[in-house]
Image (spheres, rainbow, N blue to C red):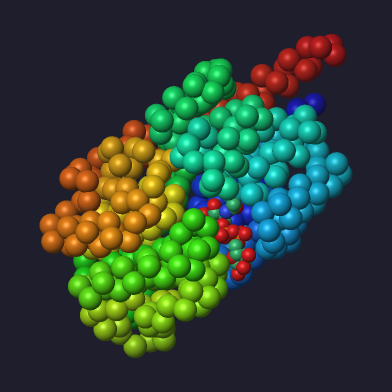
Amino acid sequence: MSNPAFRIVNIVGARPNMMKVAPLLAEMRRHAELQPVLVHTGQHYDYSMSRVFFDQLNMPEPDYNLEVGSGTHHAQTAEIIKRFGELMEENRPDMVLVVGDVNSTVGCALVAAKESIPIVHVEAGLRSFDRGMPEEINRVLTDAISNLLFTTEESGNQNLAAEGVSADRVFFVGNLMIDSLIGALEAARRSALRSKLGVRKKGYAVLTLHRPSNVDDPHQLARTMAALAEIAKEIPILFPVHPRTQQKILASGFNGTRVWDGETPVAPSGIWTMPPAAYLDFLGLVDSAAMVMTDSGGIQEETTYLGIPCLTYRNNTERPVTVTMGTNRLVGADPGNLVKHATEVLRNRAPSNGASGHVPPPLWDGKAAPRIVGILKDYLNARRSSTTAVYV
Ligand code: UD1
């Protein structure tokens, strides 16, 4: 009798998880000996933060949706642990795979560790060295309890080695987010959003902002928005707004943004807000932008691959390769500095750190998913033979 397929539970919770899990699921489904299961924790639940990504990335319906919803970090993480724990008690897989650094990542990894289920962390080893960031806590804890750690850049290997993780558990496989990007780029370039907005190629900047450190303090947020209004005198800023940022802008009292009505072309200046963009629309917009200003992690990687100047509005990045090899420049969380660097980028119309941006970082080649799946199969088969050997 042939062996049963290996059941691998894959976790998604928040928006940036979707583009990492999508290519992995597609690859797993090509292998008869693997049975991928998809669990959505429900950390993100709005159509524009979740469902639309499933549709555009051709992801199957989740097998389970835990519907945890929003809450404080401790309440949300606790709810994820409780509900995923109940699922794992009923339905034990051969492996749990988590991606990235969100609350769903650490919550589900912790459950798997307590249940002695092997854990795989994709995007391991990234470190901002800033324990004030919730994501940094999630990264450090998840890596500490993972059995297999897949890294996207050399810094990840070095950080894990420095933390004492043995090299035989660490695999440098490249970047799943870039697998998705490469697969989606043609369709993204056909997105109608740019023509609806009435902006020409390189004639606008894209902005995203959602880190608690940038948006939670109304005074800092108002200063940031005032700096952006300065930049927006030179070039229209297109701002798809994350729900938490939307609430915070209202609370900050800043009223210098204009809401795009979804139809009329925007004016050649000003900050234009719109709901969170769908994956293909956003990628299409970034691909033709003069520059991107962001505090997101994933967007630093996407702009690096696409060769688009990126100004990261943070004091640190856990993705240093985007600065050393890519088009990213860390400007610090300083409104004055943001204006200075933005003016420079717009004047030079060049990648923000002088790099060509056309040579992607090593292994960002669209083949991370097959590399990962090959390693998972070897690991699971080796584990099965060793367990069988014990009982023979
Ligand atoms: C989470 C991740 C962050 C990631 C970001 C991407 C953690 C610690 N943070 O932050 O790393 O970069 O996702 O978007 O996991 N909300 C909605 N609709 C939704 C989801 C959220 O309105 O579908 C609102 C709610 O008011 C909620 C707030 O956004 O309280 C924050 O959502 P949450 O998932 O807690 O954190 P994010 O800021 O999205």
Residue 286 sits above or below residue 230 on the image? above
Q: Which residue does the image show at 20% across and 73% down from the upper left?
A: 234
Looking at the picture, how far across and down is residue 205, in whole percent?
28, 67
Taking the image as shown, residue 169 lies to the left or right of residue 297, namely: right
Query: How far from the left and from the top, in percent, is residue 382?
Result: 66, 19
Along the viewing direction, whichever of 25 and 342 lies nearer the viewer = 342
Residue 165, image x, y percentages: 56, 21
Q: Residue furthest front?
A: 219
Q: Which residue is rendered at x = 25% and y = 40% of the image?
A: 359
Q: Is residue 264 left or right of residue 380?
A: left
Pick the quarter of the image with the C terminus: top right
Q: Which one is nearer the viewer's eye here, 131 or 348?
A: 131
Quarter of the image for the N terminus: give it. Answer: top right
Side of 238 where 107 appears, left or right: right
> Does 83 sit above or below residue 389?
below
Task: Name the spot of residue 44 as percent of width and height, x first.
Answer: 62, 62
- Indicate the quadrant where residue 233 lies: bottom left
Outermost left residue: 348
